[in-house]
Amino acid sequence: MAINKENYNRINGELGACNVALVAVSKTKPVDEIRELYDLGHRDFGENYVQEMAEKAEKLPKDIHWHFIGHLQTNKVKFIIPFVQLIQGVDSLKLLKEINKQADKAGRVVECLLQMHIAQEETKFGLDNNELKEVLGSLDELKSVKVVGLMGMASFTEDMDKVRKEFCRLKTIFDEVKQSHPDFHMLSMGMSSDYKIAIEEGSNMVRIGSLLFGERSIKK
Ligand SMILES: *Cc1c(COP(=O)(O)O)cnc(C)c1O
């Protein structure tokens, strides 16, 4: 298998024109395919399993920006702290505190996004509005994390109106939080199937896997 260069160049062009960052989601894909994109100049890659990301980071060039985009268990935080660029799925205060603790130990400040629960599905992780308030209220004490924005995943549905509404809601929350949190500047929303809608609704970072690497055989 090889990466889809045509899609990469096309998407890169589209995103460049509107200043949206591209995280290439390489979960389940081998390191040679990551390297193919790397050789085209790409540096931002997303993974959602700790061990898989750590193994790949070990084998690949050190100037790659690794984004952790999955559900992160507190007991695994320490394994990614030395090299992670952005932890996108912070979905509890407990997790953020653990990231802060491990980052402090490592002498780093680690950038994070708070994951909001915007889909109607019960299965998706994320904060609700009350939990968001609680986390925002604790940020001053957490000196070794820097929360720079929000992340969200829309419902898994063909109903694009619904998807659009969910993204729109996340953008509204983002704009509101930004007023009182000057560090907030990243809104990560949009995947292969819905990134265009996400950008129309105000996303400035999309996470795209299958359009670049092909469909995954393992559903993760
Ligand atoms: C897998 C995944 C993506 C990418 O999905 P595609 O549909 O392959 O683009 C984006 N975000 C998260 C959180 C993911 O787990």
Image: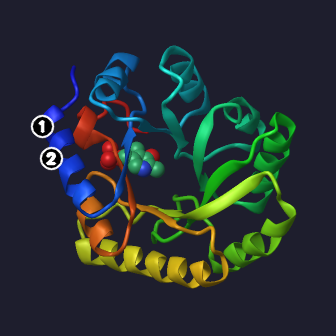
Quarter containing the C terminus? top left
Residue pictured at 40% horizontal, 65% vertical: 154
Residue position for label 1: 6
Q: Is residue 193 above or below residue 7?
A: below
Name the residue located 26 percent from the left edge and 56 percent from the top edge: 15
Q: Position of residue 177 (x, y in %)?
A: 61, 80
* Residue 63 % position (x, y): 50, 29
Q: Quadrant of residue 188?
A: bottom left
Q: Secondary structure at mark 2?
A: helix
Which three-letter amino acid code belongs to the residue tagged 2? Arg
The residue nearer to you, when weighing 10 against 162, is: 10
Q: Evaluate if marks 1 and 2 touch, with contact meaning CB atoms under 8 Å apart.
A: yes
| Figure quadrant of residue 82 | top right
Q: How far across and down, in percent of the image, does residue 57 sit?
A: 54, 23
Per the rendering, the mark at residue 70 is none
Q: Is residue 215 left or right of residue 119?
A: left
Where 92 falls versus 83 (above or below)?
Answer: below
Q: Is residue 71 left or right of residue 45?
A: right
Query: In the rendered view, how is the structure colored?
Result: rainbow
Q: Looking at the figure, which quarter contains the N terminus?
A: top left
Cα–Cα span, label 1 and label 2:
6 Å
Indicate the quadrant where residue 132 lies.
bottom right
Q: Residue at x 80, y 50 (%)?
A: 100
In the rendered structure, find residue 10 and report the number of the disc placed on it. Answer: 2
SS assignment at label 1? helix
On screen, residue 205 above or below 55: below
